[in-house]
Amino acid sequence: MGKDVIVACDFATAEQTYAFLDKFTDEKPFVKIGMELFYAEGPAIVRAIKARGHKVFLDLKLHDIPNTVKKAMAVLSGLDVDICNLHAAGGLDMMRGAVEGLTRPDGSRPLLIAVTQLTSIDQQRMEKELLIDRPLEEVVMQYAANARTAGLDGVVCSPLEAGRVHEACGGEFLTVTPGIRFADGASGDQQRVTTPARAREIGSDYIVVGRPITGAEDSVAAYRRCVADFVG
Ligand code: C5P
């Protein structure tokens, strides 16, 4: 599995997304499509971006009973996405069902990764609202271990956690890490940020980069800078 930069296309419409992707004439970045764009444009946006030659990470974070998630994943597999995801909080059976649903008759399937705890959940919220009375980091590592046990390929995590996840779950277990900023850029609403070069040192497999590329004056140059710093 090669390291790559995934561009978070957090746009509201297909037009805005295509206008952004049209800037790239020499390369085909790996694209992340999130809930906003998918719910606005439907499966057609995935087919269109795939047809343009991009790999797609469909970030829909599924979480439901095992049978429902299994059937939904079978639909996403048919869309030929390259990576999709779910919430590890759905449990082992849900994750096993997801793997089953994604697997095509020829045995191939998209990569499947798990969200452990959302970065919007901190220790206090976890204890007071969710009544989970354990250290957050322990919960993240337990959810990552569950994802591995269920046969998933990796987790979404902070780049700062990527090293520990690899230690606990093995070097081949993928870490996909948002929260990336250039050292000379604004951090925006991201609290714990890392540069592409540091994410590479820590051992992230994929970095997910949104605004530092989509909001840059020269998005292609910003993308190339990320690739140079992270992939080399
Ligand atoms: O613009 P920015 O680089 O902050 O975008 C990061 C992307 O990664 C967004 O699409 C955001 O929703 C996603 N993400 C995140 N933190 C997580 C999980 C996903 O920033 N823990």
Image: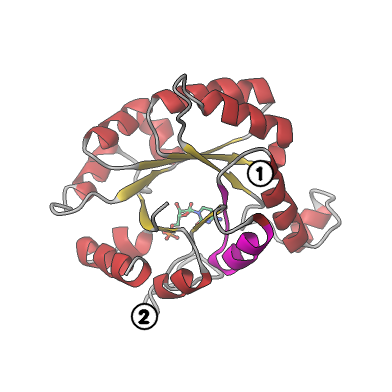
Picture layout, residue 129 above or below residue 231: above
Asked if the residues shown at circle 2 and circle 1 are in contact, with their CB atoms under 8 angstroms apart, the answer is: no
To which quarter of the image does residue 66 belong? top right
**Quadrant the C terminus occupies:** bottom left
> Position of 26 compared to 40: left or right?
left
Q: Nearer the viewer, mark 2 or mark 1?
A: 1
Q: Nearer the viewer, residue 84 or 126?
A: 84
CA distance for labels 2 and 1: 35 Å
**Magenta part of the protein: which range?**
154-168
Identify residue for label 2: 184
> Position of 117 compared to 199: left or right?
right
Disc 2 residue lies near ligand 1 with CB under 8 A = no
Q: Nearer the viewer, residue 91 or 165?
A: 165
Q: Position of residue 55 (x, y in %)?
A: 33, 42
Q: Secondary structure at mark 2?
A: loop
- Nearer-N-terminus badge (2/1): 1
Question: Does the magenta segment cover residue 199?
Answer: no
To which quarter of the image does residue 5 belong? bottom left
Q: How is the image coloured?
A: secondary structure
Q: Residue at x 24, y 62 (%)?
A: 219
To which quarter of the image does residue 161 belong? bottom right
Badge 2 density bin: few <14, some 14–19, many ≥20, Cα 10 Å: few
Q: Residue at x 72, y 30 (%)?
A: 93
Identify residue for label 1: 147
